[in-house]
Image (tube, coloured by chain):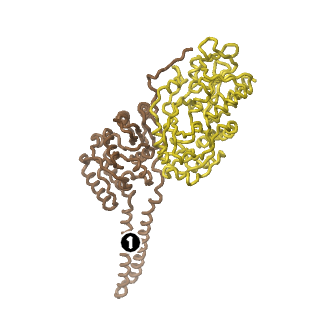
Chain colours: A brown, B yellow
Amino acid sequence: MIADVFVSVVAPVHEPGAMLAPFVAEVVDLLRQTYRHYELILVDDGSRTDAAVWDAVLSRHDGVRVLHLSREFGEEQAIAAGLDTAIGDFVVTLSPGADPPALIPALVQRAREGADVVLGVRRSRAGDPWWLRAGSAAFYGYARRVMRLDLPANATHFRCLSRQALNALNKLRETGSRLRVFSTYIGYASAAFPYDPIGQTRRSRSRSPGEAVTLALGMVLDNTAHPLRLVSLLGVVAALLNLAYAAYVLVVYAMRDDVAPGWATLSLTSAAQFFFLSLILAVLCEYVGRLPRRFGTEPGYYVREERSSAVLLREDRPNVVHES
Amino acid sequence: MVGGGFYGAHIAAFLARRVPVVTLLERERTLLTRASYNNQARVHGGYHYPRSILTSLRSRANYPRFIAAYPAAIDRSFTKLYAIARRQSKVTAGQFAEFCRRIGAPVKPAAAAAARRFDGDQVEAVFEVEECAFDATALARAVAAAMHAAGVRVCTGVTARAVAPGGTRRLRVQWGDAPGDTTDADVVVLCTYSALNDLLAVSGLPLVPLVHELTELALIAPPPALRGLGLTVMDGPFWSAMPFPAEGVHSLSHVRYTPHARWSDGGGDGHPVCGDDVLRTLPASHAPHMQRDAARYLPELAAARYLRSLWEVKTILPRSDVDDSRPILARPVAGAPGLLTVLGAKIDSVYDVEEALTAMLDSDGIR
């Protein structure tokens, strides 16, 4: 039974090597058997892979597009580039090698039943080291309480968006980590889709501690000015303390006779200096915190080239020779 | 003249002013039924080529000539809007406006009511330009009248089977099965596009390297509010929806989805692929793809009703043969003096071929 919908699949790939051909074959076969219309958008995240590898895929399968980004922009940006050009009624994103293509129909089915955003969620983090599990728990807790973003824990890139949700997402001009927080941000009906990633490859591309911290930090900094607010609060507190110290110096100077000459002047000067410095820093922090909202318009990626399937005519095509 | 498309018919009338007897052979029952009909029906005003200023300048030069020559076929009853895509476009709105200014093409920001039809997130700016469409049926009548006035003998329903040196003149064209079904001529111009190499191969003549594309143009009935609009989104893998005057509907074409398959011939061994064979087994339509993508930029288009598709084999030159940004081939065939091939591109650049043909006939000593 072929469903009468148009499904787009966006897959970011980086240095795919030998896995590309079987991956594309698996996805395209599945899509062709399941949906009336489909497209597979491979976003090449600045690979140095030989052009012949892409050519082979484009000439063998119908409905495949390759978007070559000009350099490596990262998986998030590669997915964003694919989403910007996907035309389907439902758009699935997945990481080749990690997310099982066989689950695409089940994922899309959830979306067709009414969830505008279906998020793939890993069943367990059993394969992850303890520090990653502890760190991610801390991060999700911070996100929920401080950033007021109820991020689904353990969400992956395996997602399905309705056209409506995708259009709303594309209107968000923030780049960077927009994909990770979008479901809560745009507020459409969302659903979690628990599944088990393909085990073997998952392990090989698991993050190092540095990468994990950078990612978490990036998401926090991209989405909230909260850390900056903390610093500006600290500045105000420091300013008040200096004010109190200045008052203390004046009181001591007035009450006691054994004050060393110059102590009061020096102390007052430094207290005043630090008062103003702290105040200025606090005000600056408030302004800096508002900047990203105004200037977040630069494109997050650049496309070098786009190419589409050009399946050659069938080999058994009648080759009529007109004899004269 | 072999081939009664627009190029063949126009050039036949042009040649008849210079040589005493011109005969045109057309395989179909009527003129202009193939590539001249199965296309966007756009008279190019140069706006399409912001990355090739030479092509644009040629379009600017040819545009008024074409309109003046075939006024009865021109439809300018609609507002022509060009929108620049915000993402993945190869030019920005500022660059497009500057480019139009440089080639002297009229351009102004579209009226707010028209611009608002586009999704402001997908489109950076919308311009109103001066461009028109042609009615292929009216154009066929006009060009037939021009041939009649010039004294061209038009033979429709006649297929040229082969052409070879010999006969009472320099060349003999075989057009029927009987040995006597021939016509002799001093100059034979082949204007048969996708069938060009097929004819050359059968005639035992050297082939021309050509690239062919199987193309699909969707015909749609747009919602009433869009009927008076011609819409184009630039510049890259985008689309165009504009009036198709010959049938009173809109055509929808897409840079990404209009070409279905591409092949080349004339480059080496093997008999060339015959375009008609390709058209016999058509692939699944891309109209749903075109409409879905177009509706992302102009949501109202989702309500357009798909009618049918026009399929055609579009023949172009390999990129290496396109010099001076004028993708028009007019060249003699080696080993057959007097035999010329003509391969036009945009319908209004027929005047470029006139120049090239004049030069060839001059050098050939034909007065």
Identify which residue is drawn at 38% across, 53% down: A182
Q: Chain of mark 1?
A: A
> At which x and y percent is residue B63?
66, 40
Q: Position of residue B111 (x, y in %)?
A: 58, 53
Q: Is residue B145 visible?
A: yes
Q: Residue A136 falls in which quadrant of the image?
A: bottom left
- Of residues B284 and A311, the one nearer the viewer is B284
Mark 1: which amino acid? Val
Q: Nearer the viewer, residue B194 or B222?
A: B222
Q: Is residue A75 left or right of residue B151?
A: left
Q: Secondary structure at mark 1?
A: helix
Q: Residue at x 37, y 81 (%)?
A: A247
**Residue appearing at x 59%, y 23% in the figure:** B27
x, y percentage for residue B345? 60, 33
Q: Name the residue tied to disc 1.
A: A236
User: Where, quadrant-wise, is the C terminus of chain B in this rendering?
Assistant: top right
User: Which class describes the residues within 10 Å of circle 1: few (<14), some (14-19), or many (20+)?
Assistant: many
Q: Position of residue B184 (x, y in %)?
A: 68, 16
- Please determine whether, in this image, residue B237 is positioned above or below residue B367: below
Is the N terminus of chain B in the top left, top right, bottom left or bottom right quadrant? Answer: top right
Q: Is residue B281 left or right of residue A16?
A: right
Of all residues shown, which one is farthest toward the top? B179
Confirm whether residue A214 shows in the render: no
Does B208 sit left or right of B364 as displayed? Answer: left
